[in-house]
Image (cartoon, rainbow, N blue to C red):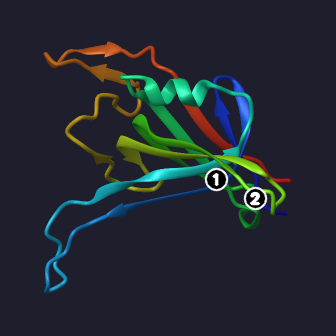
Amino acid sequence: MKYRTMLLFNNREIEVLTYNFGFNRNINASDQPTSSANFAGLELEIESGSNTDFEEWACKENAIDQLELKIYYPYLKGGSKTMTFFDCYLKKYETVFSNTNDQPIKDRLIIICAGVKMPNASLEYSTYWRKTLSGAQKEVTNNGSAVSSNGTNFSVTPKLS
């Protein structure tokens, strides 16, 4: 068995070729932390197609409410974990062509977000510009009241082949 990841985007499944994400923290000369952790971004490579949704997302002024990355592990008998990313912006979108491999055209996405919820973690990463809350998915307005969010949801779901 091998890993297979699909990006569910506007009710469509798109093959995810690679992804990575991480957190950064500044340290001083004594190797002590000098800042809180910062989300370094989520990078995805997907099969290219005629889809223009990514170009539209790159030009949107509003964030996408939620993005999920669900990873299935073949060695855990179907076990999985889900990472949830909130208030996501498409920081960079580019198409890459190479005639030397199996996927000649790929799209590269770099996504930044205001919140990250990791499985089995007691804390959630959050920035000052986060609006979408985990759980009920309500948006916090400037006056502090909560309203239902009608934004677009994205989901990344791997499948075992």
Asked if residue 126 is positioned above or below residue 39 in the image, the reply reads: above
Residue 153 visible from this viewpoint: no
Q: Relative to 73, is 93 on the left or the right?
A: left
Which three-letter amino acid code belongs to the residue tagged 2? Answer: Tyr
Asked if residue 79 is positioned above or below residue 51 in the image, the reply reads: below
Looking at the rendered structure, the number of numbered marks drawn on it comes to 2
Q: Residues within 10 Å of mark 2 (few under 14, many from 20)?
A: few
Q: Are marks 1 and 2 in contact (CB under 8 Å)?
A: yes
Question: Mark 2 highlights which residue?
Answer: 3
Image quarter hosting the N terminus: bottom right
Which of the two discs, 1 and 2, labels the residue nearer the N terminus? Answer: 2
Asked if residue 62 is positioned above or below residue 58 in the image, the reply reads: above
Please provide percent x and percent y for residue 66.
Answer: 47, 32
Q: Relative to 148, is 155 on the left or the right?
A: right
Residue at x 37% of width, y 23% of height: 62
Which three-letter amino acid code belongs to the residue tagged 1? Answer: Ile
SS under mark 1: strand
SS under mark 2: loop
- Residue 30 shows which numbered tag? none
Residue 96 visible from this viewpoint: yes
Q: Residues within 10 Å of mark 1 (few under 14, many from 20)?
A: many
Q: Relative to 114, is 51 on the left or the right?
A: right
Please provide percent x and percent y for residue 112.
Answer: 40, 44
Residue at x 24% of width, y 43% of height: 127
Considering depth in this image, is 99 or 54 the residue closer to the camera?
99
Question: Mark 1 highlights which residue?
Answer: 71
Please provide percent x and percent y for residue 87.
Answer: 38, 33
Q: Name the residue furthest bottom.
A: 30
Please provide percent x and percent y for residue 19.
Answer: 59, 55
Inter-mark Cα distance, 1 to 2: 8 Å
